[in-house]
Amino acid sequence: MISNESCPIPLSDYPEVTMAHGGGGKLMHDLISRMMYRVFSNPILDAQHDGAVLRTDGRRIAFSTDSHVITPLFFPGGDIGYLSVYGTVNDLAMCGAKPEWLSASFILEEGLPMETLWRVVQSMGEAAERTGVSIVTGDTKVVERGKGDGIYINTAGVGIIPEGVDISPSRVREGDSVILSGDIGRHGIAIMAIREGIDFQTVIQSDLAPLDKIVSELLEVDLDIHCMRDLTRGGLASGLNEIASAGKVSINIRESLIPIRDDVLGACEILGFDPLYVANEGRFVVILPEKNAEKVVDILHKHENSRQATIIGHVAEASYADVIMESSIGAERIVDMMSGEQLPRIC
């Protein structure tokens, strides 16, 4: 039964949810942890994974859902169709599951050109074929003109977790290595460039990509992977903070080890963005015992999308959960959740 107690997030601090707090920032983190988890709390949800890990008929499955509200709908390196499929496939992969089935629900704005919808549907079909998933159910709704941003897509997915695979933030331990699969920030900057019509002289393409095949190869080897997390809205900083919070550990990283392309770094400097918080759609972190870290890096280097994979830090025991970064000059600073979000409607 829902209680009549007052709202757990003081209205004086956050009088309303604004577009700038669309996800990945401190307000959304507070909203989820202090409001959603508080009312919906159960052992499966409280694991704070990329998806729910469920047991049925002796098998374990992963179940995940995501909504996609990106503007513009088409961008260098992909579109909302590819994004909606890959986003859910990647969340399932982060649970150690082999993605199998997806649902797809469309909220269409009145007046959306049929050609636009057809392009998006074709992209979803191609993405599903590439990842081997089947879109098996769905729904379509139409909202009034001016109230839908063209098209919103919600996808939910189910995948099968192989026996012996146990991936969860709660398994992260002191001494574990933290591996980043590649350069960060490209998705967010690609969206910003086309959205605002900014010419950076080079076309920055989103890193949007499916991660299921890479993860499957990692899981074929006995590496004792403790946790994985794809770095979407909120970027590397938010992903690591979520893991630290759920695992009740401190994660220490080194700035000099984090791969960032020069054009992305230059764009971030011009726009005043911190690349640690810029969204990605084809990057993830792997956390596992130090003795197996180099084996993971070697496997990742075999794939085009993860040739820049590198060990960027380690897990340390701490009295409270945090992420600490050593700068290029040797100083340390806490990398916290952002108070807001740098770019709304980006995933």
Image (cartoon, grey):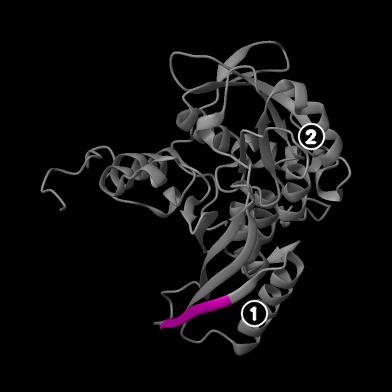
Between circles 2 and 1, the one closer to the viewer is 2
Q: Which residue is mark 2?
A: 296
Sequence order check: which comes first, mark 2 or mark 1? 1
Name the residue rendered at 54%, 38% in the picture: 168
Indicate the amino acid at tag 1. Val
Q: Is residue 67 rendered to the left or right of residue 91?
A: left
Q: Which mark is residue 190?
A: none
Describe the element under mark 2 as helix, strand or loop. helix
Most foreground residue, 64 or 25:
64
User: Any magenta on residue 163?
Assistant: no
> At which x and y percent is residue 260?
76, 36
- Taking the spot 44% from the left edge, 13% from the top edge, the residue there is 319
Majority secondary structure of the magenta segment?
strand
Residue drawn at point x = 73 percent, y = 56 percent: 209
Instruction: Give the residues in magenta.
Output: 136-142
Q: Residue furthest top?
A: 330
When asked about the image quadrant of residue 292, the answer is top right
- Decide: is 223 above or below 132: above
Residue 125 higher or lower than 12, as above or below: below
Quarter the C terminus occupies: bottom right
